[in-house]
Each structure stands twice: as structure tokens, then as C-alpha cells.
Amino acid sequence: MREMKCPVCGGEVPRTVLRSKTIQCPTCEEWLRVRGLSPLLIIPLAACGYWLAFVAAERVGLRGNALLMVTVLLGPFAGLPVASVLGLLLAWVFRIPPRLQRDPGPRSSDGGILHIDSPPGPRNGPS
């Protein structure tokens, strides 16, 4: 089984810590997370999904606008089985571990509501 490597120090990170969203490297104690899918992988998966939706809708007997609507609406969902099979193939058959990256931590765009005060008004002097 291949081991996961910390991108900061190169130390080994056990797979058992992958159950949480962010993990801490046991060697350098840097916060890490699993890297998301690359757009180079998402685009072919989406193309496969739309192709599968088109072929399935055509086999059912849809033609014209109905075929177009079903293909456009179900295309993204049809790509999920392809992505699942590819993920299982990479993870279980080839034992390729997920890639890790540094966790940037909380940002200003964390979904919280910003509070903006009104600008200060002119001060009134003593009367």
C-alpha cells in the first residue's frame, strides 16, 4: 500500500486520519486537507456523463427536443457512476493515495455575515 506524504515536510501521514475534513501532519503539525478534483479530470467525466445520458435517452426512444432536454438535464448525474468507478479503480485496485495540500484555514469568505457600521457623523461640540 502506498503511503500519503505531507506536502510540507514529506513525512508519512496515516490513512486513518482521512475521516475528518482537515488533518494535522504528525511530523510537522501542519494542517492539511485532501486536494479536490482537477479540472483536467472533471471535464472528461462530464463529457462521459453527457454521452451516457444521450445514449440511454436515445435507446429509450426519445427524439428531437425531448432527447436534448433529457441529455442536458441528466448529463451531470450520469457522470457520477463513471466517477465512482474511476475513483474505486484508483483507490482500491491501483492503491493510489489521495494527494494532500495545505489547509488555508478560515478566510473572510467563510459564509459569515459581515457587519458594516455607518460612517461616523460630525461631532457636535459643547453647547
Image: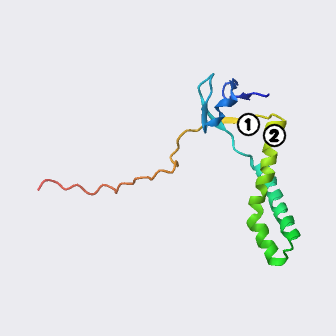
- Label count reads 2
Q: Are marks 1 and 2 in contact (CB under 8 Å)?
A: no
Q: Position of residue 81 (x, y in %)?
A: 79, 53
Q: Position of residue 1 (x, y in %)?
A: 79, 28
* Residue kind at label 1, given as amino acid type: Pro
The one of 89 and 24 positioned closer to us in this rendering: 89
Give the CA separation, mark 1 to mark 2.
Answer: 9 Å
Q: Earlier in the sequence, mark 1 or mark 2?
A: 2
Residue 113 horizontal side relative to residue 45, left or right: left
Please identify the quarter of the rendering in which residue 90 is found: top right
Mark 1 residue crowding within 10 angstroms, few (<14) / some (14–19) / many (20+): some
Q: Quadrant of the C terminus?
A: bottom left
Residue 102 showing in the rendered view:
no
Residue 89 coordinates in the image, percent (x, y): 83, 41
Q: Is residue 36 visible?
A: yes
Residue 35: mark: none
Mark 2 neighbour density, 10 Å: few (under 14) some (14–19) many (20 or more)? some
Q: Which residue is mark 2?
A: 90
View extreme (top): residue: 27
Using residue 115 as the reference point, say whether residue 1 is left or right of it: right
Q: Amino acid at mark 2?
A: Leu
Q: With respect to residue 51, does 64 lie above or below?
A: below
Q: Kindly identify the residue that appears in the image at 17 percent across and 54 percent down.
A: 125
Q: Judging from the image, what secondary structure is the residue with disc 2 in?
A: helix
Name the outermost residue toward the left.
127
For disc 1, the marked residue is 98
Q: Quadrant of residue 105?
A: top right
Which structural element holds mark 1? loop
Task: Name the residue at 77% across, 70% down.
Answer: 70
